[in-house]
Image (cartoon, grey):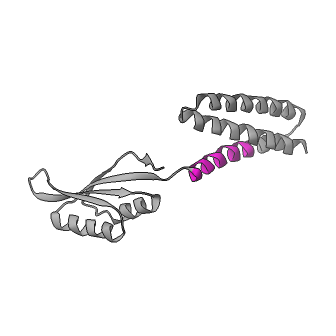
Amino acid sequence: MEIFIVFLLKLLDNTLGTMKNIYLAREKFLFSSLLAAMSTTVYMIAVVRMAKSDGVFSIIAICAATFIGTLIPGLLVKKSEKEKLYIFDITADSMNSGKEFADILRIANIPTKTSVVYDKMMIKTLSIKAYCANREESKMVNEALYPAFKYNVYTPMILD
């Protein structure tokens, strides 16, 4: 029973520590500090409990709790994040393949903006901006990109 309590305490400690790091990266300094203080308190209780227990099972329990306590909060935060707008800036290798690709995006109802540009050899080609409102659209654009195309993805913006 003591090993189970140590496991739960370490799980809580790592969960709080991971959440602290996430909120620190988001510049929520006060909340991050509170999470750090709670994590340290739980950690100290776990250390005292572990000192009372013996054997390899305590170490295995702490390792498992560390793994789970770090993995789960990150996955939950990623799942709960709002969708982001990804902007693909694509330059086709030719005018015809650019038109073909832009039509594929339009059929998929992905907003696009096209403009005529010239490449380094002064050959007329097409520049395409694709505005993907979710992960599925971004994945579709990535899969549909022709190998000869050059592209950049702009920093995503959070959609409200």
Across and down, in percent, residue 141 comes to 36, 62
Question: Taking 103 as reference, is 123 above or below it?
Answer: above
Look at the image and tell me whether residue 138 can be seen: yes
Residue closest to the far front: 160
Across and down, in percent, residue 118 comes to 12, 53
The magenta span reads: 63-80
Look at the image and tell me whether residue 56 can be seen: no
Q: Residue at x 77, y 32 (%)?
A: 43
Question: Taking 91 as reference, is 39 above or below it?
Answer: above
Q: Residue at x 69, y 41 (%)?
A: 15
Residue 93 vs residue 23: left or right? left
Q: Which quarter of the picture shows residue 126?
A: bottom left
Name the main secondary structure of what is drawn in magenta.
helix
Residue closest to the far bottom: 107
Across and down, in percent, residue 22 comes to 58, 38
Q: Quadrant of the N terminus?
A: top right
Residue 111 vs residue 6: left or right? left
Q: Residue at x 75, y 40 (%)?
A: 12
Q: Residue at x 63, y 31 (%)?
A: 32
